[in-house]
Every structure is written in C-alpha cells, then in structure tokens.
Image: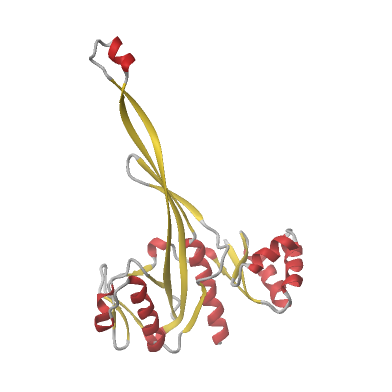
C-alpha cells in the first residue's frame, strides 16, 4: 500500500477539488468536502508505487505540498516503542524497560507529531435470565418452575486521547507517548494532578529540550481519518472497537516525512 498525502495547497480549494476529481474519478463536491476537513489529507492509497508517484507528481506540478510513503513501512502498533515509565535525562528521553533500557537523544529527534486517537467502543453482552414459567411448573409437577431466556445489552463508549509520536533522525521506528497509559512519576517535581496535564508537560519539556526537532499538532483537529473495526472480548461479551489509530499512525509518518523535507 502506497499512500499519497497533501499538506499545503498552491491553488484555491475549488480549483483543486475539480482537479482532484479528475485525478481520482470522483466528483468535485466529494473532494471539496474532503479538503474542507483540513490538511494534512491522505489523498489516495495505491497497490502500486508507480501509481502513487504519478499522482504525487501531478499534485506537485499544481504547486501543492505533497509527499508519499510505502504504508507497509509504517510500523504496526504492536511493535512501536510505547512510552510507559520514563525519565527526562540530561541528554535524552530515557526508558528503563522492560524489555531493555532505551534512550533517544534530544539532538537526535527529527519530529514531534502530536495527534489524537478516537475510538467508538461498543460492547455487546449476553445476559441469561431465568423466569418463573407456570406452564413448565404444571407439566413437570413443580419440578421445573423456570424458563431460561437470553437477551443482549449494548453499551457504547467514546474513547479519545492525545498521543505524541517521536520520530528519530536515524529513521528507526517512532516512539509513541499515550496520554492515559504513560506513567508520569519520572516528571518528579513537574508532576501534575491529571494525565492530560502531565502529557502536556512532557510535550512542553521535549520541545524545550529538543529545539531542533520539528513540531506539528495539526492531527489534533484534522477530520475524516479512516477508521478500522476490531472485534475482541471475553466469554459472554463481544467488543467492537472502531478506531482511527492506524490511520493516524500512517498520517503521522507522512507528516514526519513532510517536516523532514521542509528541514532540508
């Protein structure tokens, strides 16, 4: 999968909506709605690299800021370095492990991309009940008095948290700081009462300690990022999570490429 993303427009929105519609075989109305959701925008994904390069060339020829990447190169969520326990060292961000201690030097940080993960979590629970059944009691002479029934209960929760992707200049896999799963004791005297306050404190400290790293927070507000449905859950319950985390990760990777291109 090869993704092409648009980061800045060199022509009016209406003009680009018409041009994109011609490129993609859609309508100007559809493309105007997508552009109105905000940039950056993943314009299209392709199975072949040549198709992605052709669209990228057309976008740049119209004066737009655009980049592309091989989506397969985006590290899967399970293998990203997730920051849990950490400390702000003198020279870099330190992770004590497990599995092993790691560090990322402040002067080796290419980009800090702040974003938001959104998910709609729907839990379907099967409830088994037994109710008194006069008919069963009569037929069984009182030995069986209850009839088993089942019903489903649905609970819907909206999950929303901020995340920070840290991209190293080395090109290694990005680290990700999740607002609610990080352990903030390493902040010491900077520790705040809430997870959001602590998350923002880390962002502020990293920006101050890594002045050479580009910073971008447009993914906090951009809309229309594709979501994926996952099913999981224990016995007796089924959990459907519609999450945009994978789409955000891809767009964060494209953002880092864009920021790195601006720095050169």
Q: List x then y, in percent, for residue 243.
A: 47, 57
Residue drawn 69% across the image and 77% down it:
60
Name the quarter where the N terminus is drawn.
bottom right
- By what rule are the colours in the image chosen? secondary structure
Q: Determine which quarter of the picture holds residue 139.
A: top left
Q: Position of residue 22 (x, y in %)?
A: 76, 63
Residue closer to the observer: 70 or 88: 88
**What residue is rendered at 45% in x and 64% in y?**
117
Q: Is residue 27 above or below residue 53?
A: above
Specify whether 256 is left or right of 58: left
- Observer-nearest of 189 and 216: 189
The answer to whether residue 29 of the structure is visible from this angle is yes
Side (left or right) of 58 relative to 97: right
**Relative horizontal placement of residue 91, taking residue 256 as reference (left or right):** left
Q: Is residue 173 visible?
A: no
Q: Eyeballing the image, is 201 above or below 32?
A: below
Q: Position of residue 226 (x, y in %)?
A: 55, 59
**Residue drawn where x is 69% and y is 68% of the image:** 55
Q: Residue at x 36, y 46 (%)?
A: 233
Residue 125 on image: x %, y %:
37, 41
Considering depth in this image, is 148 or 222 the residue closer to the camera? 148
Residue 138 falls in image quadrant: top left
From the viewer's side, name the closer residue of 6 and 222: 222
């Amino acid at each position: 999968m090869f993704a092409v993303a648009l980061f800045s427009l060199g022509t009016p929105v209406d003009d680009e909506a018409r041009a994109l519609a011609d490129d993609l075989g859609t309508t100007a109305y559809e493309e105007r709605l997508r552009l109105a959701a905000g940039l950056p925008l993943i314009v299209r994904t392709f199975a072949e690299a040549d198709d992605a390069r052709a669209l990228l060339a057309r976008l740049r020829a119209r004066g737009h800021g655009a980049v592309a990447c091989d989506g397969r190169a985006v590290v899967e969520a399970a293998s990203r370095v997730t920051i849990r326990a950490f400390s702000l060292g003198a020279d870099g961000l330190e992770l004590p492990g497990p599995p092993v201690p790691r560090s990322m030097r402040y002067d080796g940080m290419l980009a800090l991309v702040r974003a938001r993960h959104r998910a709609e979590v729907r839990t379907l629970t099967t409830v088994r009940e037994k109710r008194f059944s006069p008919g069963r009691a009569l037929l069984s002479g009182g030995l069986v008095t209850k009839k088993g029934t089942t019903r489903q209960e649905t609970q819907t929760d909206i999950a929303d948290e901020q995340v920070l992707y840290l991209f190293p200049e080395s090109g290694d896999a990005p680290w990700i700081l999740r607002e609610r799963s990080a352990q903030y004791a390493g902040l010491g005297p900077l520790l705040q009462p809430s997870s959001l306050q602590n998350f923002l404190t880390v962002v502020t400290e990293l920006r101050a300690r890594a002045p050479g790293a580009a910073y971008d927070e447009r993914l906090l507000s951009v809309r229309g990022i594709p979501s994926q449905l996952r099913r999981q859950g224990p016995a007796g319950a089924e959990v459907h999570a519609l999450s945009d985390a994978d789409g955000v990760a891809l767009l964060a990777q494209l953002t880092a490429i864009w920021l790195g291109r601006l720095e050169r």
